[in-house]
Image (cartoon, rainbow, N blue to C red):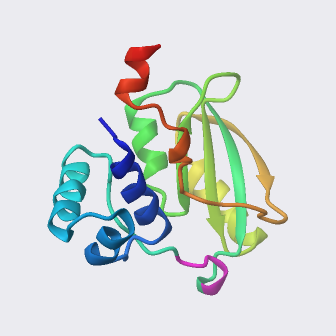
Amino acid sequence: MIDEIDREILNILQRDGRTSNAEVARQVNLAASAVLERIRKLEERGVVRGYSASVDPRSVGFGLTAFVSVRTSECSYETDELLANIPEVLELHDVAGEDSYLLKVRASDPEDLSILLKEKIKSIPTVVSTRTTVVLQTVKETMELPLDRCINDESRKKS
């Protein structure tokens, strides 16, 4: 169960995963040891899956973002794994509808995207076709969840 204090802790960590336990404790008005224990429990339960740095893609040569709809002859764990193992694939979603998968990919430029499509995605035996949408501008991109809207177990019981 996620209570209000856990939600506050998660919001702080979502904004900056490097926030010290002492600073989190100060912000939620708890002892640092209590915050450390709460974070440890959130990690053990898989609520907090890990910590990472947000790297600017343009700064490291991956300025082109595209979404690729992939249609396959069959959906299988093997196809899942082959697509997931392509480093340029940042997100891989098994979707309902005409397409089998939706991928978010990064490339350096249109030529690099073409190579990615031809040599890595379309070379997978089960891939029948792809449809690519190139992003012109990213207005918003975040991994922060709107935790103030999350429903905890107590709210469900009252409903």
Query: Is 105 on the left-hand or right-hand side of 54?
Result: right
Magenta span of residues: 55-59
Q: Position of residue 78 (x, y in %)?
A: 39, 36
| Of 144 and 82, the residue lying toward us | 144
> x%, y% of residue 15?
50, 67
| 99 lies above or below 20 | above
Residue extending furthest right? 136
In the image, is 95 to the left or to the right of 48? Answer: right
Magenta span: chief secondary structure = loop
Residue 65 sits above or below residue 57 on the image? above
Identify the image quadrant of residue 10: bottom left
Q: Where 70 sits versus 64, above or below?
A: above
Task: Give the side of residue 151 with respect to residue 130, left or right.
Answer: left
**Which residue lies most toward the front here?**
29
Q: Residue at x 67, y 80 (%)?
A: 58
Residue at position x 82%, y 66% in the image: 137
Between residue 142 and residue 66, name the one nearer to us: 142
**Dividing the picture into quarters, in which one does residue 154 lie?**
top left
Within the magenta stretch, is there residue 16? no
Q: Choose between 107 and 128: the one closer to the eye.
A: 107
For image coordinates 34% across by 41% down, the residue present is 3
Q: Residue furthest top?
A: 159
Give x and y (percent) for residue 5. Answer: 35, 51
Quarter of the figure with the N terminus: top left
User: Residue 107: image x %, image y %?
Assistant: 65, 69
**In this rendering, would 90 be left or right of 70?**
left
Is residue 56 rendered magenta in the image?
yes
**Residue drawn at (42%, 15%) of the image:** 158
